[in-house]
Amino acid sequence: MSAAKPLPLPVGVGEITLNWLQTVLDVPVTGFDSEVIGVGEGFSSALARLRLSYGDHGPTGPASVVVKFAAADEAVRDILDAFGGYTRECRFYAELGSTTPVALPHVYFTRIEPDGTNVIVMEDLTDGWVGDQVAGAGVEETKALFEQLATMHAQWWNSPALAAMDWVQPLEASLSRERLKADYTRGLVTLREE
């Protein structure tokens, strides 16, 4: 018996179908409304919030989810692809998310294809605080962030398990020093212009 062919991944919110949602959420969704979110806030992914309806079945699943895709901007995708950013995120949620001792959204579905096409369907944390990479964070938010980062990194610090995770490598292993220097210089020029 052959394995079922995986459902093709949508590359943007306009390609999400009811059948795809029902399959990845494994609940009888009867409809959904979509809203693009995070535009202009410095996110490195395209984001959409889906508000789900279940018809006569009643709410058998989440009221809404957030769906993440690779950025629409090719330059942003190239940067993330250069250091495996999308691969790292998808595999983190799929392989480590449930064992990581920090607050994470529940992930209903995540997959990345060899060509880099990727989708993450996750819990909608609308009521929580969402960072803004452009505006930055205040002292208290930054402190909370570093406390969470320290907790996460403490679990994996010098862990022999990391050797088996080829996708978890130091940044410099996936990016050349020349590329890092060029990106830094370009960013510095932009900062000086502003």
Image (cartoon, rainbow, N blue to C red):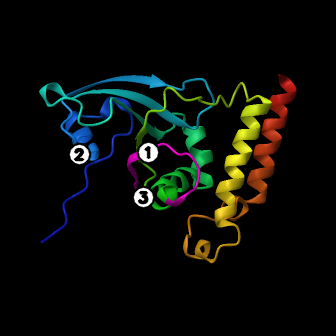
Describe the element under mark 3 as helix, strand or loop.
Answer: loop
Q: Residue at x 47, y 32 (%)?
A: 47
What stretch of residues is rendered in magenta?
A: 99-114
- In the image, taking residue 192 as reference, residue 10 lies left or right, namely left
The residue shown at (42%, 46%) is: 107
Locate residue 129 relative to residue 32 in the image: left or right: right
Q: What amino acid is labelled 1 in the image?
A: His
Q: Position of residue 141 (x, y in %)?
A: 72, 33
Asked whether 126 or 187 is in front, the reply is: 126
Q: Nearer the viewer, residue 171 or 82?
A: 171
For numbered disc 1, what is the local secondary structure?
A: loop
| Alpha-carbon span between mark 1 and mark 3 | 24 Å
- The 10 Å Cα crowd at callout 2, few under 14, some 14 to 19, many 20 or more, is few
23 on left or right of 99: left
Q: Closer to the N terminus: mark 1 or mark 3?
A: 1
- Does the magenta segment cover residue 107? yes
Please give the residue where the numbered disc 1 appears in the rendered image: 106
Identify the residue position indicated by label 2 in the image. Answer: 26
Single out the mark in the foreground, 1 or 3. Answer: 1
Q: Position of residue 143 (x, y in %)?
A: 76, 39
Q: Tag 3: residue type?
A: Pro
